[in-house]
Image: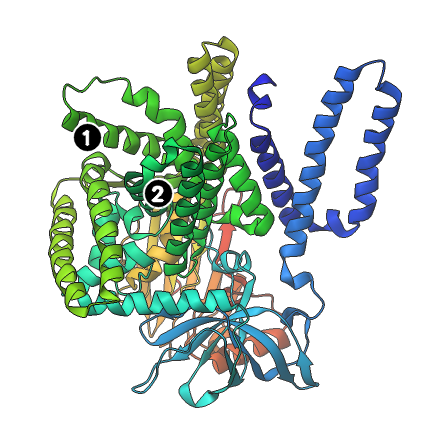
């Protein structure tokens, strides 16, 4: 336990995170919070009363344990309270079809190809039962037209029409967009045409946030006006104020492949650069007592002014809070611990919003800083650079190695790739980002008073950004710029981090027991990998994916997959988002878009195939005529409603596949219901999966009589 004594807020943060996770997973436990509180309080009081004199060490130990239990309890309460659906007047709890609704814009705008997206706070809904006062946020998509403009924060709107629940994933291992937005307390969205909404007022709920959005919008306009070149201005917009709407796909992919995407996502790196600039300019103030106070005030003021310029984006808010805690801790005059400061920052942020724990940016920010603090000093000491320039380069490289080492498991877990040339790109991009950020802020400051000066600085900055973009794009020419198709499960990530922390602790303090525990984590990780390989190697199933209009079936045998498509070519996005996530998680190879219907017989739009002895019949959307005889099949997939054909097919499993017509789908379901036929609708229930390990196989060669 000695390892934890110096880091109380690290303990508290871990306990709070555990409570939040439990509160989200098992909210029913917190339905009686006061009862649970009393149950936890009684053992503490009894322990303190009976053992206060006999065993003070035991009292301290149990008191510490129960304090952590209380924080777990607090985390669960915060998680339940933060879920706005638990409030009785939330729109999710109101019954009846919505005819119209009103509310106010509560976020900055996010530009999409055909829509402007806003977060919209509901105030009232008009339903079949009448008008209801409600609460809760939705995503409001306002369709763009020739005269459309940005609707500012605080604008009150009346919208004619309904909003709809955000759907969850329909295919195995698909990204759960519904859960992702639920963590932000957004559960519905509305797509609105220009003639379906009207402004009815203007009342910003938060004047400071309104100011931040106006400053951010003005800054974006100045960047676009001062910097020549569309992509150069887009990069500065992303790097300086976090507006990534104007980045094209090529630039995004190039920065991602080079391991430099963090530069285009305003985060802790940018706040760290701002703090470094403050230290370079005002660092001499720390030599005197009052100078230290002035330095703290300047540092906090500049950092939070930068947060204002970015529109108080969540990532900058987190980083600003983290740096504020560290700055205040260092200025207190007491001996501080960086781990404890980070723990306090995390604790404060999670008290403010417990769902931060689920955000990738929150996780990566703290893990990266912890990695730099833990691993950079010993890595830096491995080499003794002969001169200042090489020492500077090695310092950057050591920081990059430490950050990548710490974030590698999480990066693979979320993004499934690793940038091969991250060391070289970061040696270039980190100093370049310091130049771009400082020059960009200087441009905004000077440009506010002199347009000519702003344009001059913008011209020079644009040329520098063009050169940086060229360097980043050059990495794509190199062989294997990224190692992709990587997969780590949750258990593997936890074991890796436990092993890393205890290995570091054992080496640093020359202790055997942490090293032994680290080795145990490594052995457990190896066993987990072996179990995953065994599971993947013994899988045998068929999957029919929900891919809107394309019918795609997957015959999976071990680590081999036979994909069959009945379309000429499946859209790349369907492959990337609906099929490949399942292939990756199942240990299969990456699917390509040029799928063909191999080993498939067809006649008049009716398809038949035998996949490892499983008979599959598909009534395609262009099916016509009748079969020459009644047929027996294992799986029948209907993409068209044809009663005559349906009556000729005897199937163990009836699957309603992708269909173009919603009305035809309903007619088919009514017909099957009238005949008491069980069926599976992929549009409503998601992908159809059938485990074939114990399923009897067929030797039938064809259903077509020639």
Tags 2 and 1 touching, CB below 8 Å = no
Instruction: Give above or below for 168 relative to 140.
Output: above
Q: Is residue 508 above or below residue 21?
A: above
Q: Earlier in the sequence, mark 2 or mark 1?
A: 2
How far apart marks 2 and 1 lie (CA) works out to: 20 Å
Residue 78 screen position, x and y as percent: 65, 50
Look at 74% across and 49% down and name the residue there: 30
15 vs 48, nearest the viewer? 48
- Relative side of 350 to 487, left or right: right
Disc sitting over residue 275 in the figure: 2
Q: Position of residue 315 (x, y in %)?
A: 42, 51
Residue at x 56%, y 44% (from the top left corner): 348
| Side (left or right) of 661 relative to 70 | left
Residue 647 position, x and y percent, is: 52, 74
Q: Residue 112's spot in the image, x, y percent?
A: 34, 70
Q: Which residue is mark 1?
A: 393
Near-viewer residue (559 or 498)? 498
Describe the colour scheme in one phrase. Answer: rainbow
Q: Secondary structure at mark 2?
A: helix
């Amino acid at each position: 336990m000695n390892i934890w004594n110096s880091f109380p807020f690290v303990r508290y943060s871990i306990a709070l995170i555990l409570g939040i996770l439990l509160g989200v997973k098992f909210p029913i436990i917190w339905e009686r919070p006061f009862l649970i509180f009393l149950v936890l309080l009684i053992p503490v009081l009894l322990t303190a009363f009976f053992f206060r004199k006999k065993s003070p060490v035991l009292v301290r130990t149990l008191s510490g344990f129960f304090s952590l239990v209380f924080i777990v309890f607090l985390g669960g309460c915060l998680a339940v309270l933060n879920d706005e659906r638990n409030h009785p007047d939330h729109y999710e709890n109101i019954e009846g079809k919505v005819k119209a609704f009103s509310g106010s814009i509560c976020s900055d705008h996010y530009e999409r190809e055909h829509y402007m997206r806003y977060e919209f706070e509901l105030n009232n809904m008009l339903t079949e039962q009448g008008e209801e006062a409600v609460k809760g946020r939705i995503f409001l998509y306002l369709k763009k037209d020739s005269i459309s403009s940005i609707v500012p924060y605080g604008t009150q709107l009346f919208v004619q029409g309904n909003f709809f629940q955000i759907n969850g994933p329909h295919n195995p291992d698909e990204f759960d967009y519904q859960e992702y937005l639920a963590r932000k307390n957004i559960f519905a969205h509305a797509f609105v045409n220009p003639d379906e909404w009207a402004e009815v007022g203007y009342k910003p709920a938060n004047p400071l946030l309104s100011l931040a959005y106006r400053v951010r919008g003005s800054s974006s306009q100045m960047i676009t006006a001062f910097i020549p070149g569309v992509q150069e201005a887009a990069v500065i917009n992303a790097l300086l104020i976090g507006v990534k709407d104007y980045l094209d796909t090529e630039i995004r992919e190039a920065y991602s492949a080079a391991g430099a995407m963090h530069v285009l996502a305003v985060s802790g790196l940018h706040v760290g650069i701002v703090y470094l600039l403050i230290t370079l300019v005002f660092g001499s103030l720390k030599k005197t007592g009052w100078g230290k106070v002035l330095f703290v005030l300047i540092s906090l003021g500049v950092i939070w002014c930068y947060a204002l310029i970015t529109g108080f984006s969540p990532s900058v808010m987190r980083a600003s809070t983290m740096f504020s805690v560290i700055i205040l801790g260092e200025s207190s005059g007491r001996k501080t611990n960086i781990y404890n400061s980070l723990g306090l920052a995390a604790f404060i942020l999670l008290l403010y919003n417990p769902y931060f724990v689920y955000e990738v940016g929150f996780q990566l920010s703290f893990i990266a800083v912890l990695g730099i603090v833990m691993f950079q000093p010993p890595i830096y000491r491995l080499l003794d650079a002969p001169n200042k320039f090489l020492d500077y380069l090695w310092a950057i490289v050591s920081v990059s190695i430490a950050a990548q080492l710490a974030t590698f498991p999480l990066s693979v877990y979320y993004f499934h790739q690793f940038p091969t040339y991250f060391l070289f790109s970061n040696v270039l991009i980190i100093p370049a980002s310091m130049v771009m950020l400082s020059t960009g802020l200087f441009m905004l400051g000077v440009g506010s008073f002199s347009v000519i000066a702003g344009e001059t600085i913008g011209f020079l900055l644009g040329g520098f950004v063009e050169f940086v973009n060229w360097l980043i794009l050059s990495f794509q020419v190199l062989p294997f710029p990224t190692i992709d198709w990587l997969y780590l499960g949750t258990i593997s990530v936890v074991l890796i981090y436990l092993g890393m922390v205890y290995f570091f602790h054992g080496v640093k303090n020359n202790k055997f027991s942490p090293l032994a525990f680290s080795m145990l984590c490594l052995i457990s990780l190896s066993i987990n990998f072996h179990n995953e390989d065994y599971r993947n190697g013994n899988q045998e199933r068929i999957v029919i994916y929900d891919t809107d209009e394309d019918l795609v079936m997957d015959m999976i045998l071990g680590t081999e997959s036979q994909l069959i498509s009945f379309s000429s070519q499946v859209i790349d996005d369907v492959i990337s988002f609906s099929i490949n996530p399942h292939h990756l998680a199942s240990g299969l190879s990456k699917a390509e878009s040029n799928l063909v219907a191999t080993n498939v017989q067809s006649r008049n739009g009716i398809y038949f195939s035998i996949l490892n002895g499983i008979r599959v019949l598909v009534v395609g959307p262009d099916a016509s005529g009748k079969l020459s005889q009644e047929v027996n099949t294992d799986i029948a997939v209907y993409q068209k409603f044809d009663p005559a054909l349906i009556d000729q097919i005897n199937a163990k499993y009836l699957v309603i596949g992708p269909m173009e017509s919603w009305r035809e789908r309903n007619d088919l379901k009514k017909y099957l219901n009238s005949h008491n036929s069980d069926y599976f609708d992929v549009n409503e229930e998601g992908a159809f999966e059938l485990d074939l390990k114990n399923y009897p196989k067929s030797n039938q060669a064809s259903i077509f009589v020639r």
